[in-house]
Image (spheres, grey):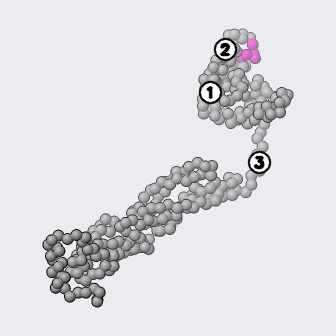
């Protein structure tokens, strides 16, 4: 099989030319070997066929790109060798600017080796972990590029659990399959809720009189549902109230508990009336926390 040098057919010395260069070269070659100007010249008839064939391939960018791969192998590399050695006799045989196409020797393949697995981590907040979502992650490729992936995080994922993305690890060798990508999930608490096992912890601020007298109050869980809890009389800061089934999701579709730590908060400033009432309480109360 003969590989034709379309660039040389059009009178071009290299493949590093623009589409305009190709058009200009084609018009010049077509005019030179036009049948009307070369009546009875069989060589000119053959050449005009090759010229048209060359332009048909090189004038289409996708076809040119495909052709250039072969050109670099059969022509470009030989030209570089010729320039290096300076030996004009080392010109390959051709049939009208064609070169003999030699079969490419196939190197024996070694054993297929699967690519190495890659592990990375991703942080999500407690709400994202509870409800689940899709999140994008960017990773560096072995050749220094960037690969963007979309990771589906299932609802109720566990702290430290790993998500596996098949064939997104390092490439294999000798036709081996790529490795896998493992993404370790780090669930971050927020200023309202924190996670421990299957339970969610939160804090609730209450007034001194709510703590002393007892009160029913409303609190929201992570799923934004309201629940009523009772604060017992004589509640102390640090006491806890537990709401079963309002915590984090378990594997069996049940949920852990919502554990509420009560914190007594004293007003930083008082109205005249409030100050008067506290003064009266101070006079009548016999309670002394330092002796309790």
Residue 284 on the magenta span: no
Foreground: disc 1 or disc 2 = 1
The vertical placement of 212 against 224, above or below, is below
The vertical placement of 110 against 207, above or below, is above
Q: In which quadrant of the rendered image does the C terminus lie? A: bottom left
Q: Is residue 218 left or right of residue 30?
A: left
Tags 3 and 2 touching, CB below 8 Å: no
Bounds of the magenta segment: 41-45
Q: Position of residue 224 (x, y in %)?
A: 31, 65
Per the image, label 2 sits on a secondary structure element best described as helix
Foreground: disc 1 or disc 3 = 1
CA gap between label 3 and label 2 equals 46 Å
The crowding category of the residue bearing disc 3, from other C-alpha atoms within 10 Å (few below 14, some 14 to 19, many at least 20), is few
Residue at 73% x, 16% y: name it. Answer: 44
Q: Position of residue 41 (x, y in %)?
A: 75, 13
Per the image, label 1 sits on a secondary structure element best described as loop
Foreground pick, 32 / 208: 208
Foreground pick, 77 / 140: 140
Q: Which residue is denoted by mark 3 in the rendering? A: 107
Residue at 70% x, 53% y: name it. Answer: 174
Per the image, label 3 sits on a secondary structure element best described as loop
Residue sitting farthest toward the bottom: 291
């Amino acid at each position: 099989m003969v590989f034709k040098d379309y660039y040389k057919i059009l009178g071009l010395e290299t493949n590093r030319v623009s589409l305009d260069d190709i058009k200009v070269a084609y018009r010049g070659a077509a005019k030179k070997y036009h049948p009307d100007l070369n009546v009875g010249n069989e060589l000119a008839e053959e050449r005009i066929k090759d010229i048209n064939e060359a332009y048909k391939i090189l004038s289409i960018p996708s076809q040119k790109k495909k052709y250039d791969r072969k050109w670099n192998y059969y022509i470009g590399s030989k030209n570089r060798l010729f320039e290096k050695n300076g030996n004009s006799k080392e010109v390959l045989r051709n049939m009208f600017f064609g070169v003999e196409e030699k079969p490419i020797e196939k190197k024996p393949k070694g054993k297929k080796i699967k690519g190495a697995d890659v592990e990375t981590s991703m942080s999500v907040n407690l709400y994202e972990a509870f409800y689940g979502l899709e999140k994008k992650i960017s990773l560096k490729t072995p050749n220094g590029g960037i690969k963007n992936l979309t990771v589906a995080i299932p609802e109720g994922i566990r702290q430290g659990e790993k998500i596996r993305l098949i064939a997104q690890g390092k490439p294999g060798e000798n036709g081996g399959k790529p490795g896998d990508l493992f993404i370790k999930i780090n669930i971050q608490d927020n200023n309202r809720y924190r996670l421990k096992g299957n339970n969610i912890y939160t804090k609730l601020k209450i007034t001194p009189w709510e703590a002393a007298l007892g009160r029913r109050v409303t609190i929201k869980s992570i799923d934004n549902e309201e629940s009523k809890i009772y604060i017992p009389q004589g509640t102390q800061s640090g006491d806890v109230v537990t709401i079963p089934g309002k915590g984090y999701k378990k594997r069996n579709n049940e949920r852990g508990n919502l554990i509420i730590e009560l914190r007594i908060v004293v007003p930083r400033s008082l109205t005249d009336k409030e100050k008067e009432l506290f003064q009266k309480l101070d006079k009548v109360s016999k309670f002394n926390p330092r002796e309790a």
